[in-house]
Amino acid sequence: MATFEGKVFSVTGAGSGIGAATAKVLYSRGASLALCDLQFEALEKIARELKPVSAGQHLSYNAVDVRKTEDVNQWTDGIIKEFDRLDGAANIAGAVRILPLGTLLEDTTDEDWDFTIQTNAAGLQMSSFPAESHEKWGAIVNMTSVAGLDGAAGCGAYSPSKHAVIGITRTAALEAAPKGIRVNGIAPGLIDTPMAATDNFPVETFLRQVPMKRIAQPEEIGRMVAVLLSDDASYMTGEIVRIDGGLRA
Ligand SMILES: NC(=O)c1ccc[n+]([C@@H]2O[C@H](COP(=O)([O-])OP(=O)(O)OC[C@H]3O[C@@H](n4cnc5c(N)ncnc54)[C@H](O)[C@@H]3O)[C@@H](O)[C@H]2O)c1
């Protein structure tokens, strides 16, 4: 099990689901964390649940809208000031907005395109972070989806936005490699979070295609984030790890 004592990681979307579970996994392994989400009260609740396991472990949390460059820059500057370093970023904030489910690309409104691309793709602003903030060691994990690897008819702009996450991840991996920073992505299948309950998503129909015949718990994704942030993945960059219960086995 990786030990993150002395490391500082940022986690976006930490107020719910996979982001919250990731924060719990990383904190339980000794990392100091800077969390953000749109929902400040949700962050407060998660922060109360996190228990330090080592002396000198710090936690901060801020309301940040990852769509807004100025907000993200201010947050990053604050992290460097407070923690004096940033070793890794878990970019997990994301949103699905399918109005209604079954909306074809041709019927997707401009507003939906903008919202979805801004949140899921442009929101990955932490795909690079200042080189001076780390010691020639850094790791970034971006959250895509199986809908970023394969098309997903009737999901509006969500699948295109998650394909963009993969393009950003691979490009960032090439650009960051000389700085000693690795950038990888995770493509989850169906995970038991509030998002999976969005817009009457047909969970039972989806599960019929999943060989493992169950929905995953968000911790099962959080643990892979921890692997990718650790030296266990020291020669791995630009890769997308699919976690889907065998959907495409
Ligand atoms: N749940 C699934 O089945 C599933 C499957 C594949 C991929 N994913 C991806 O995993 C990530 C997390 O999803 P989840 O299931 O935990 O969803 P969730 O809705 O439980 O959590 C998402 C969090 O992101 C935050 N967020 C949304 N927009 C934001 C913004 N502009 N700025 C800051 N924070 C913002 C929300 O407030 C929320 O707390 C997303 O990127 C999602 O696309 C989820």
Image (cartoon, rainbow, N blue to C red):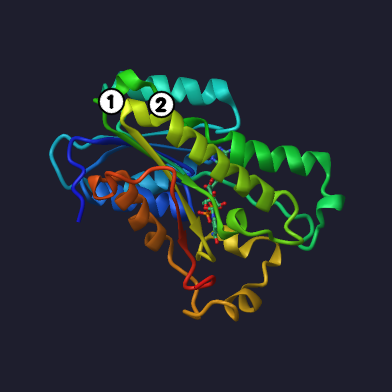
Residue 49 at least partly seen: no
Residue at image mark 2 = 129
Please report the residue visible at 63 percent of the width from the left and 59 percent of the height from the top.
150
Query: Considering only vertical position in the picture, is 113 above or below 201?
Result: above
> How far across and down, in percent of the image, does residue 113 sit?
75, 42
Q: Quadrant of the N terminus?
A: bottom left
Q: Residues within 10 Å of mark 1 (few under 14, many from 20)?
A: many
* Quarter of the rendering containing residue 69: top right
Please report the residue visible at 73 percent of the width from the left and 55 percent of the height from the top.
98
Describe residue 151's horizontal placement relative to residue 74 as left or right: right
Which amino acid does the dot numbered 1 rest on?
A: His
> Which circle's residue, 1 or 2, is located before the other in the chain?
2
Describe residue 186's horizontal placement relative to residue 51 as left or right: right
Query: Considering only vertical position in the picture, is 179 above or below 97?
Result: above
> How far across and down, in percent of the image, does residue 112 sit?
76, 44
> How far across and down, in percent of the image, does residue 193 sit?
52, 61
Describe residue 46's horizontal placement relative to residue 148 as left or right: left
Residue at image mark 1 = 134
Please report the residue visible at 59 percent of the width from the left and 56 percent of the height from the top.
149
Q: Are marks 1 and 2 in contact (CB under 8 Å)?
A: yes
Q: CA distance from mark 1 to mark 2?
A: 9 Å
